[in-house]
Amino acid sequence: MDKILYYAVTLAESALGIFGVRGFYDQPRYAVVERLDRGVEIRAYEGRVAIETDARGQGDGEAFGRLFRYITGANRSGDRIAMTAPVEAGGQRIAMTVPVEQGSGGTMRFFLPHAVVASGAPEPTEPGVRLTRIPAERIAALQFSGRITPESRAEQERILAEVLAAAGRMPAAAPFFMGYDPPFALPFLRRNEVAVRLAS
């Protein structure tokens, strides 16, 4: 994709994200296999591929920058890769930007579009950036809107834990956050989720 066109499309997608329009972003595929109380969904996710780097926690712009450079050409093919959603963050709380995941181990991830994975994701050229495969898994998720604060996230995590305990479901790891919108999206239009990976 032409560099100017790539940045123009990215800017347009970000602008629409202010109003909760997220249909342009490739998203991991899943099926809802069960619905529990209070809106909790049990989802079966397909395997997916991400690019990741180690992060220091909240608002780690350096980690974000390394991943952003990968999708804008810092890879063996020099390809520009479209952004995806959702943002996933676990462990430490971070400022959310599409398309980032932060795992409980302090890693930050961008999920790669399905077409890029199918054609062979290019290897990163920057040190500390690596490709990773996430296997198919079951995840319990609870959707909510509004601003993301440590307090709002903790409250939603508490609700998720209570619903899962009442249903006899065992989490396999700590809860994490998935955000589908850029940080400047209108809070009442945001799609936020707290989630937990389930034991097999």
Image (spheres, rainbow, N blue to C red):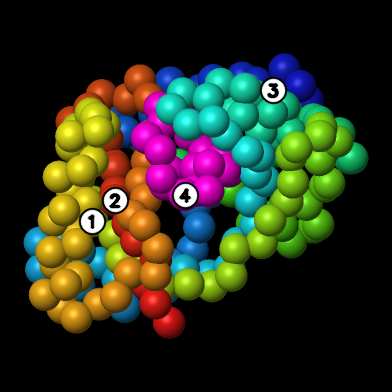
Query: For mark 1, what is the residue?
Result: 142
N-terminal label among 1 and 2: 1
Residue located at (43% from left, 21% from top): 15
Q: Categorize mark 1 by other alpha carbons within 10 Å: few (<14), some (14-19), many (20+).
A: many
N-terminal label among 4 and 3: 3
Res. 17 in view? yes
Tell me: residue 32, above or below residue 84: below
Q: Comparing marks 4 and 2, which lies closer to the viewer?
A: 4
Query: For mark 2, what is the residue?
Result: 194
- Residue in front for this viewpoint, 35 or 173: 173
Residue located at (66% from left, 61% from top): 133
Residue located at (86% from left, 36% from top): 125
Asked whether the beta carbons under mark 4 and mark 2 sit within 8 Å of each other, the answer is no
Query: For mark 4, what is the residue?
Result: 104
The magenta span reads 88-110
Query: For mark 3, what is the residue?
Result: 5
Residue 146, x across and y down, in percent: 19, 32
Say what amino acid the circle numbered 3 marks: Leu
Distance CA(mark 3)–CA(mark 1): 36 Å
Asked whether the beta carbons under mark 3 and mark 1 sit within 8 Å of each other, the answer is no
N-terminal label among 2 and 3: 3
Distance CA(mark 1)–CA(mark 4): 18 Å
Distance CA(mark 4)–CA(mark 2): 13 Å
Q: In the structure shown, which secondary structural element does the residue marked by tag 2 occupy?
A: strand
Left or right placement of residue 147 versus residue 8 in this view:
left
Q: Is residue 95 magenta?
A: yes
Asked whether the beta carbons under mark 1 and mark 2 sit within 8 Å of each other, the answer is yes
